[in-house]
Amino acid sequence: VVSIAQVAEAAGVSPATVSRVLSNSGYPVRPATRDRVLSAAKDLDFRPNRLARALVTSRTSIVAVIVHDIADPYFGEIVRGVEDLARQHDHQVLVASSDRDPVRELEILELMLAYSADAVLFAAGALEDERYRRESRRLLAALDAAGSAVVQLAPHRVRATRVTIDNAAAAAAMTRHLLALGHRRIGYLHGPDELATSRVRLDGHRRALDSAGVGFDPALVAAGGFTSEGGEAAAAALLDLADPPSAIFASNDLMAFGALNAARARGLAIPDGLSVAGFDDVPTARYVWPPLTTVAVPMRRLGRTGLEVALRILDGHPVRSRTIPTELAIRGTTGPPASRHDANPGGI
Amino acid sequence: VVSIAQVAEAAGVSPATVSRVLSNSGYPVRPATRDRVLSAAKDLDFRPNRLARALVTSRTSIVAVIVHDIADPYFGEIVRGVEDLARQHDHQVLVASSDRDPVRELEILELMLAYSADAVLFAAGALEDERYRRESRRLLAALDAAGSAVVQLAPHRVRATRVTIDNAAAAAAMTRHLLALGHRRIGYLHGPDELATSRVRLDGHRRALDSAGVGFDPALVAAGGFTSEGGEAAAAALLDLADPPSAIFASNDLMAFGALNAARARGLAIPDGLSVAGFDDVPTARYVWPPLTTVAVPMRRLGRTGLEVALRILDGHPVRSRTIPTELAIRGTTGPPASRHDANPGGI
DNA sequence: ATGAAAGCGCTAACAT
DNA sequence: ATGTTAGCGCTTTCAT
């Protein structure tokens, strides 16, 4: 409510000088003058209006993160990572949940443009949808023209710098872990099929199976939409098969949680009656029972690095896409198959 | 990158007219003119600069939510609730995690002032700290003077409209549930003690014990800091007591998850060897095993109502603080105590 | 080293 | 019903 003009008046200098002092632009100001400005500002409890500043500098210090759902722990962790670095750079985090709705996603992009966010971090995307490709391309171009840095934190076909994990390799590694334990019939809980992330993870799984000479059986794949409820239903379907799998690889942790429940509802002991593996390593993964074996995705680091890259782009430095390494977190839900599963009569 | 002036030129009208059409202010504009403006805007792919607009209207359509940690599922749900309503009103959500650090909290308030957020929703707070009371009061006053609506979603001693649950009553209800099952030695996992929420929940528990004529035993209270790790350690301490409790009431779900692990590490069956109850009903509460008995807090509704109230305040309507009702979600982790616990030799 | 003045893109009186 | 003008609060040439 107090403006730069009032501070200028109180300090007996011009608004320009106040600006120069307070935006610590490194502009030369006589120490005595600076002190007067500083104390006047303090006395008046002056707080520069960031929007007015943004209007002239065209830098808002706002970074937008587009997630699938902020209440999903995976995205919560990512946003936290972004926030941690944002704080250090005096940036503010705007979150928007798209629910993987392409229309909503485009709306969000429009908004970010209207608010001229300095950086737009795509953590979730449904932009694979053909109908929206053109539109999204247009918006991304506009964002670029407006000087915003766009970074994607998940595989997309959109052209933008990427900070991602190697989903296929990670999924393959987990499948190999299950294979090494002796499993031959491995159920797979697939995510939303329009999502590149889902497809890439499934590919990794399939390739690992192929390399091991274990046939990929489409009947062992059930879609669970990346939710616990979906995972429970999908796992139930697999477990009720005439020849059920001895292990289930859920392509995200929430689905793995659902699978655990489906198994228990059938009286299957974990991991003796059924092995279950997840993907992501959300915080609660250690707190289900037994602790979940999963692919540990450094979610916070993903978010943090995403912003780091965006900031670098804003500074005019060219930045290449990066891949963040993942690890397998082998915990209690995976083990060797029960003997009756050891051999697969009709298989391999 | 295209301004209102260019649209005006293309449509052959004045900038004012363009503004009147595009901000659908209900201002009378001849249909023919309106159409020309609309099509010019569309052709040029015009997107009004919200910051410029905010500068003159002093309405940013930004709502800030101050949480403890956006990666904590409780806060994720709240933010999602806020976001749901924000979308309907074309508002944007700015999140900031304070980690319950009073200093950080004040910084956030300063920032929200600098960005002139229309509404500031306090979901988490450590402002009980004496050293920061004065400062926070000053900032809240400034926010008020700046025309922002401040709403608190958790008990605080700060003066602002409140949208909260009745923490004490809810905690008392859960304690009575445990009492009704026959438990007499009930361990309690306390949250951060500086937090009003923690203290109020503990009060409710204690009062329920008192009313039932069951003495409150301070030795049965262990602090767990509202985290799973803390809950695990606190529960472990209680379970290792010479005369351990037959039930543990964790004052939030994350601590309950930790308690479940502590119990299992000691070979205690749930709920036969030990009953465990939580508070909040975060989404994963249904996916631990057995499904967690907990106090169902309508987190999304809390967030949604918080924004609703803020919006009403912004519209100049006086609004009274509200209490959102909660329910007990009795699931699988609570049951009657094992017989050896039925009687408590020294007690009642 | 400091000040004057213009202008970022928009809206809101105030004309007409 | 539409146009003109001033101005929101700041930064940034350009002078001095």
Image (cartoon, coloured by chain):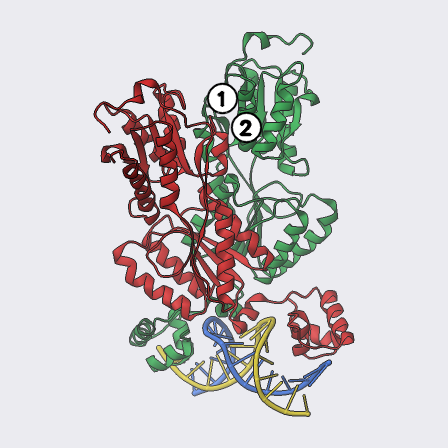
Chain colours: A green, B red, C yellow, D blue
Q: Nearer the viewer, residue A219 or A313?
A: A219
* Residue drawn at the location 62% of the way across and 40% of the way down: A155
Residue type, mark 1 in image:
Thr
Does residue B143 show up? yes
Q: How many marks?
A: 2
Residue B270 is drawn in which quadrant?
A: top left
Q: Quadrant of the C terminus of chain A?
A: top right
* Residue drawn at the location 37% of the way across and 48% of the way down: B99
First of labels 2, 1 by sequence position: 2
Q: Nearer the viewer, residue B235 or A319?
A: B235
Does residue A60 show up? no
Residue type, mark 2 in image:
Ala
Q: Nearer the viewer, residue A143 or B24?
A: B24
* Residue drawn at the location 23% of the way across and 36% of the way down: B218
Query: Label 1, on which residue?
Result: A333
Residue B111 is drawn in which quadrant?
A: bottom left
Q: Is residue A162 left or right of residue A283?
A: right
| Inter-mark Cα distance, 2 to 1 | 10 Å
In the structure shown, which secondary structural element does the residue marked by tag 1 occupy?
loop
- Mark 2 and mark 1, same subunit? yes
Q: Are marks 2 and 1 in contact (CB under 8 Å)?
A: yes
Query: Label 2, on which residue?
Result: A256
